Image: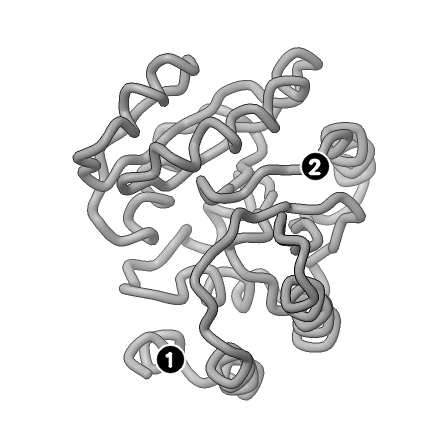
Amino acid sequence: MISVVIPALNAERQLARCFDSLIIAAVRGVVREVIVADGGSSDGTLTIADAAGAYIVSAGRSRAAQLAAGAQIARGDWLLFLHPETALEPGWEVEVESFLHQAMTERPQAAFFRFALEDFGASARRAEAKAAIRSHLLALPYGDQGLLLPRRLYNKLGGYRDLPRLEDADMVRRIGRRRLVMLRARAVNSARTRQGWLKPFALSLLHALRVPARVLAKL
């Protein structure tokens, strides 16, 4: 059913947690295969991916190149793009099964998960609230929320474009608000470097105003 594509570059500290969240879905037959698209890791990323039984494909160093390379060899009818620092919360596969069943009788749709951080501080809760507002108002989920879409829609859109950054924003813009569904399950991300709120908000606003993704990447 689903091919999971994980872009990776020196992600040995994050991959195991991401893989763990996929085990039950694989047992239930929801996940057919896991593909790690590696951008030239020099740590133990490939060893961990191989031990987990994932398919490994070599790709460029940009995340866009890795996502595109993984999708190219995927065999599933559905593609789930998932960052290595992201782990889907327990039970996500049940909701996704329901979504897939519904999607079979309706027009092609894409789905993403609610953003969450594993941190316990107040700043993490504020970041989650801002992500929820961004996802609802601007229809702009980021790559760390995961992206699930049918292969035929992915191919119709031309896949991921070769962008140095913001490949996730570019993809969801082409998918369009009407074809995006936010699932109830959460994508729980590991601690990461804080950028503050101004830069992400400004980029989200410019994206909503249809500023080209290549221009945003340069900014």
Q: Please state the horizontal and vertical placement of residue 159, each as a whole percent of the image.
A: 41, 51
Q: Please state the horizontal and vertical placement of residue 76, each as a whole percent of the image.
A: 53, 26
On residue 170, the disc is none
- Look at mark 2 in the image and give the residue it sits on: 89
> Which quarter of the figure has residue 1?
top right
Question: How many other residues sit within 10 Å of disc 2, few (<14), some (14-19) or many (≥20)?
Answer: some
Under circle 2, the secondary element is loop
Residue name at image x 28 percent, y 79 percent? 218
Residue name at image x 77 percent, y 30 percent? 91
On residue 216, the disc is 1
Q: Please state the horizontal and vertical placement of residue 123, each as a whole percent of the image.
A: 64, 68
The correct choice, above or below, for 33 with respect to 108 in the image is above
> Which quarter of the figure has residue 122?
bottom right
Q: Please state the horizontal and vertical placement of residue 77, each as a whole percent of the image.
A: 57, 29
* Foreground of the two, 70 or 153: 70
Mark earlier in primary sequence (1, 2): 2
Residue name at image x 65 percent, y 51 percent? 112
Badge nearest the viewer, 1 or 2: 2
Asked whether the viewer can see residue 177, the reply is no
The correct choice, above or below, for 58 with respect to 195 in the image is above
The correct choice, above or below, for 177 with respect to 11 in the image is below
The correct choice, above or below, for 36 with respect to 191 in the image is above
| Amino acid, disc 2 | Glu
Question: How many other residues sit within 10 Å of disc 1, few (<14), some (14-19) or many (≥20)?
Answer: some
* Foreground of the two, 128 or 203: 128
Is disc 1 in contact with disc 2, using a CB cutoff of under 8 Å? no
Q: Quadrant of the C terminus?
A: bottom left
Residue name at image x 49 percent, y 20 percent? 33
| Amino acid, disc 1 | Leu
In the image, is 92 to the left or to the right of 110? right
Q: How many marks?
A: 2
Asked whether the viewer can see residue 112, the reply is yes
